[in-house]
Amino acid sequence: MAERKPRYKSYTQPAGGWGAAAATAKVLLEQSVVTKGSRALLSMNQPGGFKCPSCAFPDAVCTKKLEFCENGAKALAHEATKFRVTRDFFAQHSVADLMEQSDYWLEMQGRLTEPMRYDSATDHYVPVSWDDAFALIGDHLRALESPDQAEFYTSGRTPNEAAFLYSIFVREFGTNNFPDCSNMCHEPTSRGLMPAIGVGKGTVVLDDFEHAEAIFVIGQNPGTNAPRMMTQLVEARKRGVPIVAVNPMPERALIRFTEPQDMVQMATFGSTPIASEFVHVKIGGDLALLKGMMKVLFEREAAGEAILDHDFIAGHTEGLAALKADIEAQDWADMVAVSGISEEQIRRCADIYVRSKATIICYGMGITQHELGSPLVQQIANILLLKGNFGRPGAGISPIRGHSNVQGDRTVGIDEKPTPAYLDRVRDVFGFDPPREHGHHTVESVEAMERGTARVFIGLGGNFVRAIPDTDRSYQAMRKLDLTVGIATKLNRGHLVHGKDALILPVVARSERIETGAGEQFVTIEDSMSNVTASRGVLDPASLDCKPEVEIVCRMAMATLPESRVDWGRYIDDYGAIRDKIADVYPALYEGFSERIRAPHGFHLDVAPRRRAWLTPNGKANFLVLPGLAVNAAVDDPDMLRLATVRSHDQFNTTIYSYNDRYRGVYNDRMILFVNAEDRAARGLAAGARVTLETIAADGIDRRVEGLTLIDYPMPRGAVAGYYPELNPLLPLELFDRISGCPAAKSIPVRIAGVSAAG
């Protein structure tokens, strides 16, 4: 596909529908798993089956026979693929040769089958036994001058049992260095919501969508990143619930959607209009919109209307006066200019919010990936608090997280800033005193590699080096390491940008059975609405040499900590024993874990704001002020544009399924820059021109990407968009939210530096 001629054609059909059905069939055929994959899909997200390895949207408790989406089918097909990466493959390809291949090509080679070790003399990976691999890890870790010289990364696909043991192993080893995939997406949720409502999670459950009277979807593209969410939005629109979509890019699924499982719509080629109000906000203009809406609420209160929930505010909150003063100080002309939308539309959005007695606000990385992402999340909490939209059916805040268990990993201990209470529980349950100093988040871990103070990197899943900012700098930093370990199902760029020693360790996938000495085991997953469910694979492992993540974690610990007080050998076989220890460390959340998980649909973790309880230092929900209207630092350059990096529809995180993005009309190309036609014309450029984009930064580093094709797209003036991870080289490592460490990937200051040479 990479060799086919690029083409660009506007997509005018509804999202979903026959296009999604055809894409599902195509990917099963492409991976040669039509029979096996179709059979496995019947078990995905079903009681007794396995959880989808892609997004974290919860499963419906209903009678529908199927509970998967197009992108879930793609994830399964690529996981169940017939293709294999064997020792013969590595013998044929040096690392230098593999670095020349695209991310898509690497993905298409198939499943890893046995542990491999890098041989610097030949620049090839060569087979290594599991025993020797674990011994190498233990040797490197024990040789460090300090445990803080190691970085322990976790991907959101890691199940609770493996993530929990990983956190215990690393803390017994002596560090809190836990760079995690959540650092790059929803960490502003985890850090920003805590002081506001006392929990770093959403407060909504799936049933709330049935009771909501208004739904706001801000900075999110559910049709691609959480397609099963479209069922709730379709049903809400059929009931006449207003849906307000706020985004710099009009996304097809939020305009019109056909449910692939609605036989009537499919048979009649029907569809449902989704957004009743599309708010074409500028990049970074969400704060001005939210403050404008809150200004309307205060204005109408001052005029004598009963708008705010005063009983709720008086009984449950603090800080209203400071928020009111900040909002009233904002000027309408400034809010209009910064948001990019009219005062009339802001007032219309406010009216939708006022009329609703139960409002859900959903948001994605269009909110979190800004320099002030954490305070911006707090402003969403503010507007919900004003009308008491917590602890009420159909209301609350709903961050839509992208990766399958990214929220669960945080819940069970993957946290570089652990609380003293948690550390005390670990000490009491496991008999060692864990370190108390905060560790590194993602950006800090790369900075430690640059300084040479980090010597070992272990990646429990994921494609760390391709996901992180400042690609060229990050590659150089990773290559300074003494050891890199990639624990994964598929070959990716992270295995090719490695340390002096390097290991690739293949794991059993989510869809595959786990057999231990104690029999068949299952793992557990927490979705983005705090439901914990069991996941049992149904397929045979890709290779007899693939090992479960739990076993890999335990054996790394045994090789590194020969005097450990933890019974690692027991946990290799008995996952129930792991869950018992999770319950011991987290009694308020997981008491009776082993019994509760037997329920067909699992159980819901307690989220205190649903009870109108606030686990904050003052015991209240807090209105928190973010002064002004900007969520990104100003740049004094008249040619400046704001770049948002985005996924294509045929992509999950760094995994590229194809070069197509059908909802945006792009085929056979990923080197794209979506641009407002007036911005393009003002620079004297033709549609389809190939340009160089460079970052505007004061650090003197030359960051540029060449060969981007300009595609006219309905972007706001001053905004451009392009694909991640191809445009990660433009994101400076230092451009991140200081509270959470989350990179500002949705607002990179750039300019078009000139026309590139023809390809």
Image (cartoon, rainbow, N blue to C red):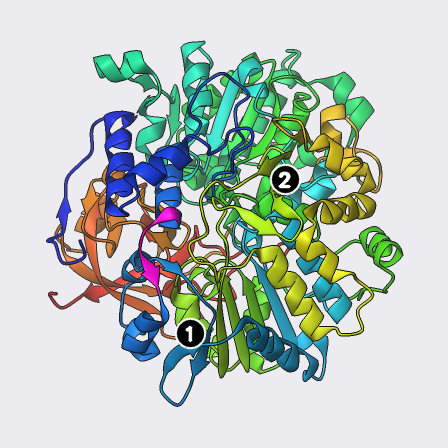
Decide: is 272 above or below 329: above
Identify the residue shown where x is 27% and y is 72%.
100
Of mark 1 and mark 2, the one earlier in the sequence is 2
- Kind of residue at badge 2: Gln
Tell me residue 660's x, y (percent).
Answer: 23, 46
The magenta region covers 80-85
Please give left or right for residue 509 compared with residue 604 in the image: left
Residue ranking furthest to the bottom: 121
In front: label 1 or label 2: 1
Membership of 83 in magenta stretch:
yes
16 or 314: nearer the eye? Answer: 16
Task: Indicate the position of residue 287 as horizontal and vertical percent values.
Answer: 52, 39
Tags 1 and 2 touching, CB below 8 Å: no
Residue on which the image places disc 1 = 497
Is 671 rendered above or below residue 533? below
- SS type, badge 2: helix
Q: Does residue 294 appear in this view?
A: yes
Q: Which mark is residue 707?
A: none
Query: 512 or 162, which is in the foreground?
Result: 512
* Horizontal side, residue 475 vs residue 171: left or right: left
